[in-house]
Amino acid sequence: MRFDLLIWAAALGLTNALTTPGNGRRRDEDQSSALSGTKKFIVEVEQGAQLTDLSRKIEATGATILKSFNSEIFSGLSVESGSDNLDTLQSLREVSQAWPVKTYKLAPLTPQASFSDDATAQNWTIHYSTGVDKLHEAGVFGKGAKVAVIDSGVDYRHPALGGGFGPGFKVSGGYDLVGEDYDGSNEKVPDDDPLDSLGHGTHVAGIIAGKSEFYAGVAPEAEILAFKVFGAFEGTDEDTLIDATIMAYESGADIITASIGRAAGFSDGPWATVASRIVEQGVVVTIAAGNDGDEGPFYASSGSSGKEVLAVASVDTSRVPAKPWHATFSLEGVSNTTQLAYISPVNRPLWNVTGLPIVPLSFDTKASAEACNALPDTTPDLSNVIVLVRRGGCTQYVKQTNVEKFGAQYMLIYNDDYRPFELVANSAYKSQMALIDAKAGAAIIETVKAGGNVTADFTNPADPNWAVGFFDATGGIPSQYSSWGGTYELEIKPDIAAPGASIYSTYLDKTWKVLSGTSKHGGRLVHGKGFAKDLSRRIISCGESLPWQAIEPQALPTDFGFFAPVAQVGTGLINATKLLESKTSLSFEKIALNDTRSFSGSHEVDITNNGADPMGYTFAVEPAGGFNAQGRTAQLLADVLDLKPIELVPEVALPTDTFIVNPGETRTAEFSFKYPQVDDESKLPIYSGNVIITSGNGDTLSVPYLGAAFDLKAQITEKMFPDGYPLQRSGPNSLGIDAYHTYAFNTSRAAQDFPKVHVQLKWGTKELRWDIFDDKYEESQWKYPPVVGQDGYIGSATYSTYSVGASTFDPATMDRDKVLPFPIRGIERTTSWSELTDRFWWLGKLANGSYIAAGNYTMRFATLHPFSEPSESGSWDIWKTPQITILPYAP
């Protein structure tokens, strides 16, 4: 039982990513750009080859071996080289796979906020939304399980996290893989102390296993293993993540969780590959789906795209953390004191007032603009009361102005039907203000209206970190910032959803904060290989569908009347009670139907009856809202605001006969799909939903399906580069390549005499190449990978590392030799909101470290189509360019 609970604990923890929802769109150039690479590569040794032989061969080229991985999970090297690229490394006999090492950045930490009867505010928790509260009532607290948190470390000094580090403490182990000064590019200085200096890992650890008098994590008796991959500068790289993941596995973790990612969308990246292999060995790995939901569909994250990794989306909670206060309701000689919730301005201290009566301005709880106009002259003195006004109709400052004219020193605003908002005090006003829940306001008004009175006690609680729940009417829907899938090969991601917005948890220096986002060997010995994969499927099957609703900043969400797509939330919100109590388990592969060209319509689900009696099962299709992935123009895909649900339902043949499974037995159910017909495939219609399997005792389990109602290759071929891209802006007049294709590589600020290529991609690509051939090259000579000296191949270009952050190369401050090699692998699409381009400056250096000689050349700049063989010339979208001329120059 502890394993199932801890899986959910990890899933919850990793959704706590670091971007506050609703604050606009973001693309971290350092993180999402194709340029955010290094001169480092990860190579995996071929089965049967010796790692030492490969090391010697690579070192003989002048490369540096940074790390050797010698694990049953992964055997290979992290390599830094100025004369190799993916082609040359992949060509080594001992190498089975090679990847570029990508960098990762944490987004800036953005804290959001450091009723009588049904108005009562309970201590803050989100366990009610997922059934974990029932597990706690049953005494299930995760005792004996270990969760590895790969993050910024953990501030284990926090009382709610045990107050210490090492055996016998809640944070019982771990390691700092990078050192405090690591920024993702400098030298790592590892040590044995994974103390957190950023706060995010501490927040995740508290969600999973924190425990105090007023707070309980999902599994408060679990142990935490802290693996620190971020120093104080919020940067790390992929080989560090791989190292930490393997280390967590070898340390005996039952669960490995990471709240880290960058846009990628391919399941075969190095970290995703390692994480999936660990799942196959019996340890569940959960990684956050990401925080790029604004960018729209097909923007999945890196590690969470791993085939067997659980990718967890975020759901808004219906109770946000707030501070407690007490109201005494007196009516007809009877009094009761009730704990309520309030939100004070972020730039003011908590209220500290007691004994004052609360006086409503009116008894109309539907007033749309209360205190928005000057109050009547008959208004009594408000100086010795707390005035109660309804939210809406004008700003809180207008309300303050009008009540202060009658002496008001305290103003409580009771919420309307919308989500709570952040108050900011204005120093021009003398009165204090705070926000309370709509139900609390109504309870106060009803009491006073009936002839009673209500007095307030805002005495600060003994523990200043005490938090209670404040109702949010917009809760229970997918978080807008949670990244959408699927992968670029139409695999299903994310897998499941868990609460991730406005999560209250432990923080640095024994404090608490509200953040939002999209988180053992003994276990393996007990359960063996396959256990984690089976358990992952069980988790996926316990999701419950969520509504597709659009967030409105100052209103209730728009309910479209459809379920949210699988590409946004997987099967839906995890139900922990169902996870543990269901007598039925399912074994299945997610129903990835692919596109119309490669449609995969036949699927099976093995149904096991773990109960004591025969069980009958019925089957139904629960379609989610379909959507057109095409954006406002034919150039790029839709962003989240472009998406509107459409009815798009496949035809599914379900088992029709009586489907009985005897106790302890397994029976296979078969499903046959036909993709829906559409009028216009160019809109890129996507359909999804769940196959619902209902047992005779009423339990329901879900199996997700997702498909593209169009031919992906037909719609994307020759459109990978949107119209007008790639483009060049070179020379002093920023000319295109048709007019400017002779270069002397004069890098002065005035000349800028080198190719400056700007690129956009409609779809993610597995490979982007910039190859230089002699002037006799014909495309019919294409071989993959090209070999220097054969078929006219001169070599791969490189690009300046300054390309990403500057518009002009400045030789006075920039190093010409700081370059990275082509090809580049695993690049995400360009988003329609930002329309940011990736920029590549070629300053004459080739991937092998030499500079190109003067002469005439053919330039081949190309991106690989989806589902294509790179060895075929027709598999590439090639930029049509004239031959280029290189004049004599001094490198």
Image (cartoon, helix red, strand yellow):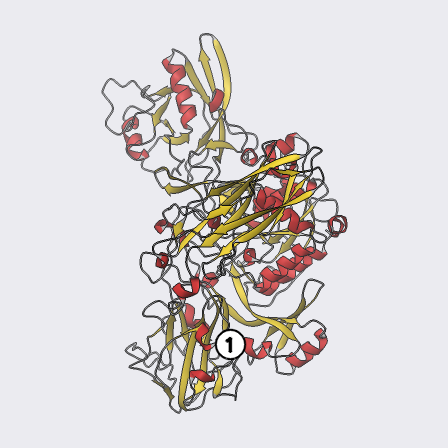
Q: Dot 1: what SS?
A: loop
* Closer-to-camera residue (482/421): 482
Q: Is residue 370 visible?
A: yes
* Closer-to-camera residue (678/787): 678
Image-quadrant location for residue 701: top right
User: Residue at the spot x=35%, y=41% of the render?
Assistant: 552
Quarter that holds the N terminus: top right
Work out whether 404 lies above or below 770: above
Q: Position of residue 682 (x, y in %)?
A: 35, 59
Residue pointed to by mark 1: 871
Image-quadrant location for residue 409: top left
Q: Is residue 17 visible?
A: no
Quarter that holds the C terminus: bottom left
Q: Position of residue 9 (x, y in %)?
A: 61, 43
Q: Position of residue 685 (x, y in %)?
A: 39, 54
- Decide if residue 850 is on the left or right side of residue 276: left
Q: Amino acid at mark 1?
A: Ser
User: Residue at the spot x=39%, y=84% of the render?
Assistant: 745
Work out whether 854 lies above or below 498: below
